[in-house]
Image: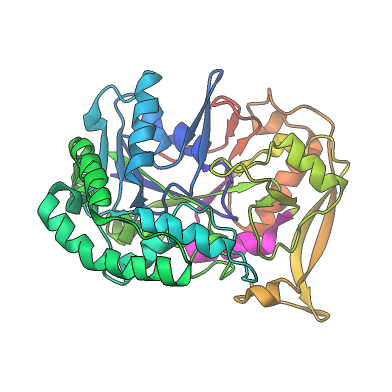
Amino acid sequence: MKTVVVVGAQWGDEGKGKIVDILAKESDMVVRFQGGNNAGHTVVVGEEAFFLHLIPSGILHSGKKCLIGNGVVIDPKVFLGEVEKLKERGFLKNDADLVVSDSAHVIMPYHVLIDVARENQKGKVKIGTTGRGIGPAYGDKILRRGIRVSDLFDRAAFRERLLPILEEQNFYITQYFKKEALKLDDIVDEYVAYGEKLKRYVGDVSLLVDEALTGHQKVLFEGAQGVLLDIDHGTYPYVTSSNCVAGAVCTGAGVSPTKIQKILGIFKAYTTRVGTGPFPTELDDRIGEYLQKQGKEFGTTTGRKRRCGWVDIVGLRYAIRTSGITSLAMMKLDILTGVKELKICVGYQLNGNMLKSYPSRSEVLEKCVPVYETLQGWEEDLSTYRAFHELPKNTQNYVKTIEELLHTPIDMISVGPARNQIIVRKTLF
């Protein structure tokens, strides 16, 4: 048995898709355990780019079992659309390679409608939601009035369950948001049809994971978003609606914490954030603009421009602590080429005092002043390097400095978007 959990160590968009794709080649099973189609993983295979939102990027390797756990919220239309696109491009030749938990909750039309309506309200604080219905779906799950994948297979039972739920949702939609009510039978017809198509992919994910581990297989667990967007541990309320820390793998995939061996945190050589919320090291200048353009920093899911800033050791230490990260993968190191002086945030000051820990309140984080250490940059193109010792001295110094500050090994370094543009200092499986 070998297990590796991959989590984002910043505000998401760190490049987890590429690392999962690389590690999937060595694994037998890849399991997604939280989030929904608000996530976006970009993987470059040869000259082709793949954009995945729900299906684990391990699907791009033939014969790998890819599972979507109960902790994920499923938009059936999006899921089936991804399946169709993969098949059109010659992937997912065997439907048995893809399994969705029968206990995963379903994103319904009213979830999307309410999500968008809330964000568009005038005078309200905008969270920066993707408008995909993720938050309302998780909300209904906690309120015990959610619809699960297994509910879609029995039309009569589904209609009976949906009836009181929709009555309440329609009251909210019509009376508060002043939108048109949704029709019960239209939703029933649409979602029962989705259920018919979903059936072939549905199974008991927790059981399949346990059987794989009992059979001494290599299992890779794939998280979405990042620790700083975690509903409990992130910069609340500017967070996602699920737990992004590594511990969520236990609830989101039905696996025992005693089975988890390694936790890999993914972070960029700088920092990005999509949407609103505090961002201490944000660069609202020509360097921030340079990083945005060079790094092609646009959200995979929304296309929104990402805010850019210097790498933040305080935030990374917090992510390492709350997720038990045992090793790190540094992404987009190549993007820093050409920046003469590189800054590393080594602490926060608040009212002239150094903070001892990462603030729990966004209002406090907003007021923090970053304390920087400055290093010399480099001019060399890093895209062809495949060994750490071959990198320019200033590049090596940058990586080593961050590694020492974090007291955590950086075992993988990405120097370009392609699969082979990676420096592996230590294998994880």
Displayed quadrant of residue 100 = top left
Is residue 340 something that shows in the picture? yes
x, y percent for residue 150: 18, 51
Q: Quadrant of the N terminus?
A: top left
Q: Is residue 326 magenta?
A: yes
The structure's colour scheme is rainbow
- Front-lying residue, 25 or 60: 60
Range drawn in magenta: 311-329
Displayed quadrant of residue 9 = bottom right
**What residue is shown at x 71% (from left), y 62% (from top)?**
279
Q: Specify whether 203 is left or right of 135.
A: left
x, y percent for residue 187: 27, 50
Displayed quadrant of residue 408 = bottom right
**What residue is shown at x 56% (from left), y 62% (from top)?**
119
Q: Is residue 427 magenta?
A: no
Q: Quadrant of the C terminus?
A: top left
x, y percent for residue 55: 38, 39
Is residue 107 something that shows in the picture? no
**What residue is shown at x 19% (from left), y 49% (from top)?**
152
x, y percent for residue 422: 59, 30
- Front-lying residue, 304 or 3: 304
**What residue is shown at x 21% (from left), y 31% (from top)?**
96
